[in-house]
Image (spheres, helix red, strand yellow):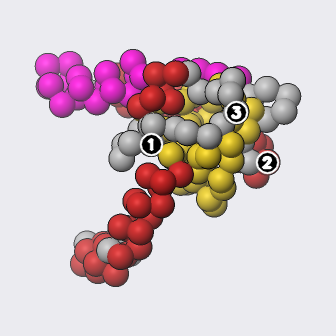
Amino acid sequence: MLIGEYTHTLDSKKRLSLPVKFRKEVGRTVVVTRGLDQCLFLFPRRTWQEIASKLEQLPFGESTARGMSRFLLAGAVETEVDGAGRILIPDFLKDFAKLGASVVLAGVSDRVEIWNESTWAAYKRRIEKGADHMAQTLGDLRIL
């Protein structure tokens, strides 16, 4: 399980070092794609294959299904984790998430989210303020 929050540097060659604790979980080949809330999603290859398989099952005639498939699949790149534990972030993904030199990697169960540091800080403040309400809503649904 991928958990935790780490701040790392995106170097001038657009390489990002993965935290040591994530490297074993994600393996040597990962998929990076556009994520939600203006971050990137990094999936271990095996997890990505499961997601892609589910997307293939969506109804082709439904516009929301087509849109989400395009959003995730067309924006995805498969990349290798190098010997130093780094991955390459292509320009179009770097631009999408507005990544600067300092980025946050957040482990979220089956994926790693890659955030612009200030975007993450603002998002985190917002969800921390709403945590009690979210817990109540999930409790009412008997999820929490």
- Evaluate if marks 3 and 1 touch, with contact meaning CB atoms under 8 Å apart: no
- The residue sitting at 35% across, 76% down in the picture is 129
Q: CA distance from mark 3 to mark 2?
A: 17 Å
Label 1 SS: loop
Q: Nearer the viewer, residue 106 or 8?
A: 8
How crowded pointer 1 is (Cα within 10 Å; few <14, some 14-19, many 20+) is rated as many
Of the image marks 3 and 2, the number of the one nearer the N terminus: 3
Where residue 56 sits, quadrant-wise, is top left
Q: Residue at x 15, y 25 (%)?
A: 63
From the image, which quarter does the C terminus lie in? Answer: bottom left
Of residue 62 and residue 8, the one placed in the foreground of this image is 8
- For the residues marked 3 and 1, what is the alpha-carbon distance in whole angstroms? 18 Å
Residue 76 can be seen, yes or no: no
The residue mark sitting in front, 3 or 1, is 3
Above or below, 30 relative to 40:
above
Which amino acid type is shown beneath numbered disc 3?
Asp
Mark 1 lies on residue: 39
Relative to 38, residue 93 above or below: above
Depth check, front residue: 61 or 20 = 20
Could you tell me the amino acid type at mark 1? Cys
Q: SS at mark 3?
A: loop
Q: Using the rendered image of the protein, determine whether residue 77 is visible from the camera's viewpoint.
A: yes
Residue corresponding to mark 2: 20
Secondary structure beneath dot 2 equals helix
Look at label 2 and name its amino acid.
Val
Considering the image in quadrants, where does the N terminus appear? bottom right
Read off the residue under disc 3.
Answer: 11
